[in-house]
Amino acid sequence: MKRQVILIALFALFGLQNASAKYAIGGSIGASHINSKHSFAFSVYGYYKFDEQILLGITSGQEQSGVPVTANLLMRLPFGRIILPFFTGDMGYYYHSNNAATMLRAGGGLDWKNGERSSILLMGGYQKIGSTEGLYSRIGLLLEF
C-alpha cells in the first residue's frame, strides 16, 4: 500500500505535467542602491517554465548584509528574436541578523538569447525592503532545460 501511494504521488508530480514543461536555473551579479549606499549583490534562481514567455520561480542570494528569499515572476514580451524585453517581479522576505522584512521588487530588462538554451540577462528596477526604497541593477545568465 505504501509503495502504491509513493508511485501515485510520483506520477502526479512528474507524469501529469505539461509535456512542454521545462525548468531554468540562473544567477546574476550586480549592485543595489538603498539609502544613498551602493552595495554588491548576487542572486541565484530556479524557474518553472509555463511556456517560452512566462517563468515562475524562487530567488535567493546576498543583498547588502542580508539574505532575500522571494517568489519571482519573469515575463518575456514577444518582441524581437534574439533580444527580448521582459518584466520581472519579486515578493518575499529579506532576512538580516535577527529580524526579517518584507521585500518587493519590480523591474525589467533585456533577455539576449545566447543559443536555444541559454540567455544573458541585463536587468534593473525598483526595490523596497521594509520601509527603505532603492534601485537595483544586475547582469546574469539563464540556462533552460
Image (cartoon, rainbow, N blue to C red):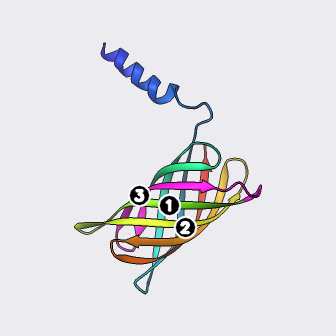
Where is residue 41 drawn, in percent x and y? 46, 71
Left or right, residue 111 beside residue 134:
right
Mark 1 → mark 2, Cα distance in angstroms: 6 Å
Q: Badge 1: few (under 14), some or many (20 or more) residues near its Cα, within 10 Å?
A: some
Residue beneath disc 1: 89
Q: CA separation, marks 1 and 3?
A: 9 Å
Picture quarter with the C terminus:
top right
Which residue is drawn at the image coordinates 34% and 69% (left, top)? 66
For badge 1, the amino acid type reads Gly
Residue under label 2, please give it. Answer: 107
Rendered image: mark on residue 70: 3
The residue lying toward the viewer, choosing from 91 and 38, is 91
Classify residue 68 as left or right of residue 124: left
Q: Does the residue at mark 3 contact the one at mark 2 (Cβ under 8 Å)?
A: no
Q: Upstream in the sequence, badge 1 or badge 2?
A: 1
Which amino acid does the dot numbered 2 rest on? Gly
Q: Which mark is residue 19?
A: none
Per the picture, the main secondary structure of the magenta-coloured stretch is: strand
Labels 1 & 3 near each other (Cβ < 8 A): no
The residue at the far right in this view is 81
Q: To which quarter of the image does residue 101 belong?
A: bottom left
Does 128 appear in magenta? Answer: no
Q: Nearer the viewer, residue 53 or 46?
A: 53
Residue at 38% x, 66% y: name it.
Answer: 103
Q: Earlier in the sequence, mark 1 or mark 3?
A: 3
Compared with 26, 13 (above or below) is above
Say which of marks 1 and 3 sits in front.
1
Q: Residue furthest bottom?
A: 36
44 shown above or below 15 = below
